[in-house]
Image (cartoon, rainbow, N blue to C red):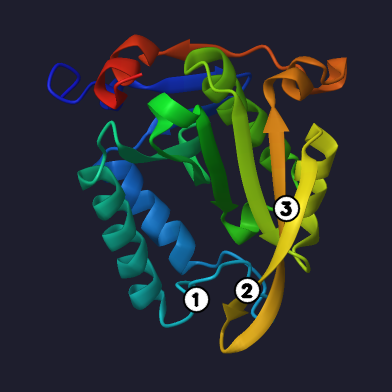
Amino acid sequence: MDDLWPLAALRVRSGDLELRYMDDADVRALALLAADGVHAPELMPFTVSWTRGTPVEVARSVLAYQWGARASVSPEKWNLELAVVRDGEVLGTQSLMAHAFGVTRTAETGSWLGLRHHGQGVGTRMRLMVLHLFFEGFDGLRATTSAFDDNAASNGVTRRIGYAENGTEILAREGRPAVSRRYALDRAAWDARPDDLRLDVSMDGVVGARDQLGI
């Protein structure tokens, strides 16, 4: 598929961790992973409660979302959903989303890991890897992200990497108001990150991805 859909060749690697553009086998593995649990039942880290329901309903939500993200990619608006893989096992997904990237050079990151992979330091590494793709591969200038105030793990990763707080907003979450914290990381802050946040990263398929995304 690489000749017709260059994004299919996109890979970002660091140590035993890989971010890769998902094929149908990865999407299926991701759906089954989500069906097995993404977060504790009393929590909800997402604005859309797609993790509620039976395992089959959750899996189907993942399939529909991933297929939709793949089909809607264009230079004007794109959502790159990358599988997080270690030793051949899909651990979760790391996304990079942009609108009018050629003008703004700004993109938003989002992610989730299967519940059984929480607490292993993967979240920080996969964020650093996608930021490497964004800044070094795509010549991005400003990365943004957000997390609900009670999502301690996500907020902790974001602050550790050096994002600046960029305000809050009140969002509806399962019928109740919830505070969402916004963050931004510019190129200067990325370049100034400490040595312990500098990974040895390699990338494949970036030239083709840039061409398909109009970068």
Quadrant in which the N terminus appears: top left
User: Tag 1, which secondary structure?
Assistant: loop
Question: Distance from label 1 to label 3 (Cα)?
Answer: 17 Å
Label 1 environment density (alpha carbons within 10 Å; few <14, some 14–19, many ≥20): few
* Left or right side of 160 for 67: left
The amino acid beneath tag 3 is: Ser
Please tell me which residue is depicted at 36% across the width and 61% down the height of the picture.
62
The amino acid beneath tag 2 is: Met
The amino acid beneath tag 1 is: Ser
Q: Quadrant of residue 211?
A: top left
Q: Quadrant of residue 168?
A: bottom right
Q: Nearer the viewer, residue 110 or 75?
A: 75
Q: What residue does disc 2 label?
A: 44
Question: Distance from label 2 to label 1 (Cα)?
Answer: 7 Å
User: Tag 3, which secondary structure?
Assistant: helix
Q: What residue does disc 1 label?
A: 49
Q: Residue furthest bottom?
A: 175
Please tell me which residue is depicted at 63% across the width and 74% down the height of the picture.
44
Which numbered disc, 2 or 1, marks the residue that appears first in the sequence? 2
Q: What residue does disc 3 label?
A: 154
Q: Nearer the viewer, residue 142 or 135?
A: 142
Q: Residue furthest front?
A: 103
Question: Is 107 located above or below residue 10 in the figure?
Answer: below
Question: Is 81 located above or below residue 139 in the figure?
Answer: below
From the top left corner, tell me how far across and down residue 160 is, in percent. 84, 38
Is the residue under label 3 in contact with that under label 1 (CB below 8 Å)? no
Is the residue under label 1 in contact with that under label 2 (CB below 8 Å)? yes
Please tell me which residue is depicted at 76% across the width and 43% down the height of the picture.
158
Which numbered disc, 2 or 3, marks the residue that appears first in the sequence? 2
Q: Which mark is residue 81?
A: none
Q: Nearer the viewer, residue 73 or 86?
A: 73
Question: Distance from label 2 to label 3 (Cα)?
Answer: 12 Å
